[in-house]
Image (spheres, rainbow, N blue to C red):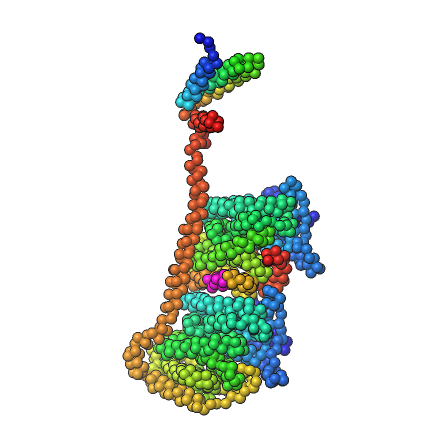
Amino acid sequence: MEIHVIHYLIISTVMMFCGIYGFFTRRNLLALLISVELMLNATNINFAVFNRYLFPDQLEGHFFSLFGIAIAAAETAVAIAIIINVYRNVKQVLTDDITDLKG
Amino acid sequence: MNILSLFVLIPLLMLLGLWIARNLNQVRGVMVAGSTLLLILSAYLTVSYIGLRNAGATDEMLFTDSISWYAPLHICYSVGVDGISVVMLLLSAIIVFTGTFASWKLQPLTKEYFLWFTLLSTGVFGFFISTDLFTMFMFYEVALIPMYLLIGVWGSGRKEYAAMKLTLMLMGGSAFLLIGILGIYYGAGAETMNVLEIANKYIPTEIQRIFFPAVFLGFGVLGALFPFHTWSPDGHASAPTAVSMLHAGVLMKLGGYGCFRVAMYLMPTGAAIWGDLFLILTTISVVYGAFSAVVQTDLKYINAYSSVSHCGLVLFALLMMTRVSATGAILQMLSHGLMTALFFALIGMIYGRTHTRDIRQLSGLMKIMPFLAVGYVIAGLANLGLPGLSGFIAEMTVFVGSFQHTDSFHRICTIIATTSIVITAVYILRVVGKILYGTCKNPEHLKLTDATWDERFAVICLIVAVAGLGLAPYWVSNVISSSVEPIISQLSF
Amino acid sequence: MDYTILILALPALSFLVLALAGMKMSHRVAGMLGTLSLGIVAVLSYMTAFSYFTAERTSEGVYPTLEPWNFEWLPFTSSLHIDMGILLDPISVMMLVVISTVSLMVHIYSFGYMKGEVGFQRYYAFLSLFTFSMLGLVVATNIFQMYVFWELVGVSSYLLIGFYYTKPEAIAASKKAFIVTRFADLGFLIGILIYGYYMNTFTFTPTEEQLMHAGMVLPWALGLMFVGGAGKSAMFPLHIWLPDAMEGPTPVSALIHAATMVVAGVYLVARMFPLFIGFAPNALHMVAYVGAFTAFYAAAVACAQSDIKRVLAFSTISQIGFMMVALGVCTAADPHEGGLGYMAGMFHLFTHAMFKALLFLGAGCIIHAVHSNEMETMGGLRKYMPITHITFLIACLAIAGIPPFSGFFSKDEILTACFQFSPVIGWVMTIIAGMTAFYMFRLYYGIFWGKENKELHEHHTPHESPLSMTFPLMFLALITLVAGFIPFGHYVSSNGHAYDIHLDWSVAGTSIVVAVIAIALATWMYAREKQPVAEMLAKRFSTLHRAAYRRFYMDEIWMFVTKRIIFRCISTPLAWFDRHVVDQFMNFMAWSTNAAGESAQPIQNGRIQSYTQWFLGGIVVLTIILLIF
């Protein structure tokens, strides 16, 4: 069986919606972060796949994937740092319970 | 520098002075110096204005000047005065001056109070000297905003509610006003914001039909036009003395002045189309305000409704669009400004002693505070139009002028409006009989004292102004009447 | 006659001085100041009258109309403006004499009467103000000046009625007086507005052209002006303020509510007389009917009052009715015959002012002596107060129309004029004249004869008043004695020509007989200690008597109109409407803005997930839209 573009897209769509579902339903900040990572990686896959299949002689998609990975890494680092700090301060990582800064 | 710019500059310097003032005496010093200077300046302006006119100056506005401010929209800082603005400036200066003395002992936050008070006066003076639509609007807003704080912070009773209501209703009005001003600007070809220049341009009938009510209503809200007058009773009742004086005495005049100078002058066709409808509303204002005042029990409410009636008469006379009635309207603004200021000053002084304004709880004050009581009677008599005081000449000019209208509908409205003089007598005498005459029933009140020197000074100044205008109206009437002429000639077809 | 300005300036000045500095003065100085200035005014008025009436008549045989002063006070248009000035013609000069005489007498009298009162200076200040306004009214050069001073006399009357401002009745009375006359003045004002609009002038003598222009509207204008006059002159049904106005000090009642201000309405009609007679004869006759009814009504009420000042008040109303009738029955037919009423009315105004002031001042002496207005506290006072008694009797005889007292002559002329107009009016007025004689002598006997209230008089023996009070009485009584012989028609007549008063003995004889019968009846009923007839009649017709005593319930009707209709049915609902409909609408606007904000608020709940849900939803919707189109 030949692996076509549609198969990649199915995987990335599933990842995307898993991420969205996770983002909507989870209250744990770490779970949210993982969901965001899922969504980001779904798009990264799309970038790479479209570039590979539709415009094989160009490289922009790959660059964008790399950018995405870099940003995701940075974002994760910052987010984890924030989450750890939040946890240190309020002993909680659930969004519903972190309401101290709400007006 | 143009002499008129001083009217804005002096209050600004006063603001600066107040800001650096360190103690109460310095604050008072700045206020007295500044307001005296303004009074002298306006008197000087009046004299030199009359001098120039007698010397044969025929321009519509004198002392004109214009500095471009934002050229793409033709916004200029342009100033100029005619007879109407001159008397309005004089009125404002008198009231700011006496208002300073009426709030002599105001506590707390005296400095902040006077800061806002002066800012308000800046707006008022700026409005009357401007001839540029945008500048006018800007000063108008400058005059309105401090009102919120002055009532909200230094007021009494339901002050937050009253301040909020007043500000919101007047801001609603100025929203209409802004639309209207833009309508005029673009209707006249988007070439100038100057009132005098727009007056010579043609604004299409359709534009006038749409934007006349916007401008007239915008200013009419401030002129207590029925049914947009309800901010007035609450606002006056809650405001501190000097703010009531300034508000009823000057700020409400901005409404009438604006209706005349902007709405009717620039959009005569619109005035002709909408005139009858607004005339009915103002006739209602006149009679309705008077009748409503009859049953009020709070002194300030009585006066506020009386103001609705009298300011209604201003708009009423303007809409009659004859030269005499318009002169009467301006005279009525002047006279109402002075006597309402007097009234509010006296009410404030009585309230400051008795801590109640309910007429059912006051009685026999004539024996206890004769000076204030006599002042109150004089204010009342001026209000009900006693010859020799200012109310009479204003009302008579309005009635005679309105009755000169050739249309019988207008004359019938005039007759309806004249009934207000009887009703006025009813509510004034009711109050005088209840609170001043008789014997004092409240033993607490027996210990109260009469007016202090600063209060006497404010009251006497206003009484002299009221009586002076009432006894010798000739020159005021002439000055106004010749300035009304060009505006009325736009309106007659 | 430039000095006439002083006639106005002096009282005005004395008012200012007394009002501003009066409190610093002693009573004596303040009183002297007011009296002195009035004395000068009186002398000047007599001089004016003397030089005016002795001056040459013009070639047409009339006295010239002089305007020594006139300046523009408030301009409206080129032709309409309020002028202030002095107009001298026979009636205004006559009024100057009347006002300054009575006012001077009242000033002197008040020295005794108001002695030691709190606010003595204020009292004299107000008297000066009143005199100034009244003089300004009569010398007005135009209708608007008249209105200006008309309002001023109204206010001075208000201030003087409310002089005892701690007394609730006085406060109510002053308020009522002002508001009722103000209501009538509204008619006056509208009349002036119509007059000014159609004639384009405020002067009393419009040109032919202006009159043509006014045409049919003129009677309306004049009729409305008469409404104002009816208010001041207490014509039915606007008379209700006058009896209550008796709450003021008695000398004030003598000056304002008997002699001068209340005849302002008569003066107004006389002032507008040429227009009335020429263009609105029907309006003029309406004046006569109103006057006749008022005269009858007031005479009937006066028969049943027990407060002596009230009796005099109603008598005043009735006598003013006589004057109005006299003016109203004039016709344009023949100047001397048809215009007789004009002369008669003015003559009666003159004589009435003197003897009615005398009556009031006499009543003041009596009240001063017994400290009450009620007749039951009096009786038999002739022993204690001889001067008051004699002068009061003279005045009573004058008002009853007994020769040779002044009232006889003027009333006789009025009756003659009435008979010429219509016998019905003539007889009606004769009967009212009889009623006048009856109630005046009822009053006279009730005070000076009749049953003495011994208990009270032993407790506090009545005494004659001091000279300051009796002198004005004697002076006015003297005038009352001789005034009838003044050849009044020489000076004042409808067309200005001299006119000899001649008594029509058929009319005069009838009226004397009627008056004598009425006096005899009063003597029979009231002169003795016991008054069985009067009591029997009062009992027999108790409903009528009570109705007359309560003034036929006119006050109740007015109270109903003012309290119920204006207060309850108009003002209260309007105020409610304002607070609960207009204001609530504004509040509703504010509330709905607020509510809109409130209802939009839950969307902004701060949960990132719900935001993203909305975000996703938006993307889905947009995608669908893009896919479809």
B419 in the magenta segment: yes
The span picked out in magenta is B411-423
Judge whether residue C4 can be spotted in this image: yes
- The quadrant holding residue C603 is top left
Residue C336 locus on image (x, y percent): 52, 85
Q: Is residue B108 left or right of residue B77?
A: left
Query: Which of the two residues, C419 or C476, is positioned nearer the viewer here?
Result: C419
Quick check: A21 above or below C458? above
Q: Quadrant of residue C307?
A: bottom left
Where residue A65 appears, as percent x and y from the top left, is 53, 15
Name above or below for residue A23 compared with residue C12: above
Placement of the C terminus of chain B among the 4 image quadrants:
bottom right
Residue at 64% across / 55% down in the picture? Answer: B82
Question: Which of B278/C238 is in front?
Answer: B278
- Name the residue at 43% across, 20% down: A17
Could you tell me if residue B307 is visible in this image?
A: no
The residue at 37%/88% (across/down) is: C517
Which residue is found at the position 41% from the left and 53% from the top?
Answer: C577
Residue C349 x/y as whole percent: 49, 80
Q: Is residue B125 left or right of residue C433?
A: right
Say if the magenta span includes residue A22. Answer: no
x, y percentage for residue C135? 55, 74
